[in-house]
Amino acid sequence: MNTINKNLQNISKVPVTASVGFAALVVALLPGLGELLQYDRAAIAGGEVWRLASCYLVHWSADHLCWDWLMFVVLGAVCEMRNPWRMRSCLVAGIAAVSAVVYWGFPAIEVYRGLSGLDSALFTLLATDLFNEARREGDKLWLFLTGGLLAAFGAKTIYEAITGQAFFVDQQAAKFVTLVFDHVAGAVVGVVISLVSVDLVCKSGLRVGIEISEKNVRVVQTLP
């Protein structure tokens, strides 16, 4: 019983990651549900706009689901425990960016599925955060490791763009084509969320800078 309670407590710390991960598994187990949730250009044009968000829960094969799901759960849980607000912002922005790239940038694509674009966003969010932390603390080992991770992601993306082949998933067996630019869009979102500072102007006239690049959101007030 104590083990069950401990597991439930851990899940409660990452509700968004757990919910999305669970939903992806449910979709995979229910035949026909994927057809209703996948990105379908004609259906979206006909008003089924929810597909722009639900398509990430659908996958082409068990292999595709395994890689995408595992990466999402691990990266999502780590990012959500480190900073829930930033992780969720990254997820929402990633959905918007990847869907926009697919819909307006690739009109020939009729159907789209998978979490990989969001995985890319979470990966670069975490890697960039760790890189910046290592740089600020002067930790050369972590600076090298996290810089290597970002470089490896870039190399993987270039490989997929040149070869047209997914690096991890057997796309021939799953019968889909690697897009690559959805990964690029997600990666850009992760880096931006990690680095950007949002400036807000309060009604009181004080300027508020929310520095998102810190572990916790820090609010700094200065005179206008």
Image: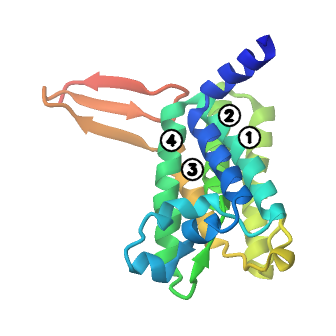
The residues bearing labels 3 and 4 have C-alpha atoms spaced at a distance of: 11 Å
Residue with the mark numbered 3: 190
Q: Which residue is mark 1?
A: 74
Q: How far is the residue under mark 4 from the one under mark 2?
A: 12 Å
Quarter where residue 10 is shown: top right
* Tag count: 4
Residue 8 at x, y = what percent? 68, 23
- Element marked by disc 2: helix
Which of disc 3 and disc 1 is earlier in sequence?
Answer: 1
Q: Quadrant of residue 104?
A: bottom left
Residue 201 sits in quarter? top left
Label 1 Cα crowd, 10 Å radius (few <14 / some 14-19 / many 20+): some
Q: CA distance from mark 1 to mark 2?
A: 6 Å
* Cβ–Cβ under 8 Å for marks 1 and 2: yes
Secondary structure under the numbered disc 3 in the rendered image:
helix
The location of residue 170, given as percent across then percent down, is 86, 71
Q: Amino acid at mark 1?
A: Val
* Label 3 crowd (10 A; few <14 / some 14-19 / many >=20): many
Amino acid at circle 3? Gly
Residue 111 visible to an observer of this rendering: yes
Which part of the image, by quadrant, shows the C terminus?
top left
Amino acid found under the numbered disc labelled 4:
Arg
Closest to the observer, 168 or 57: 57
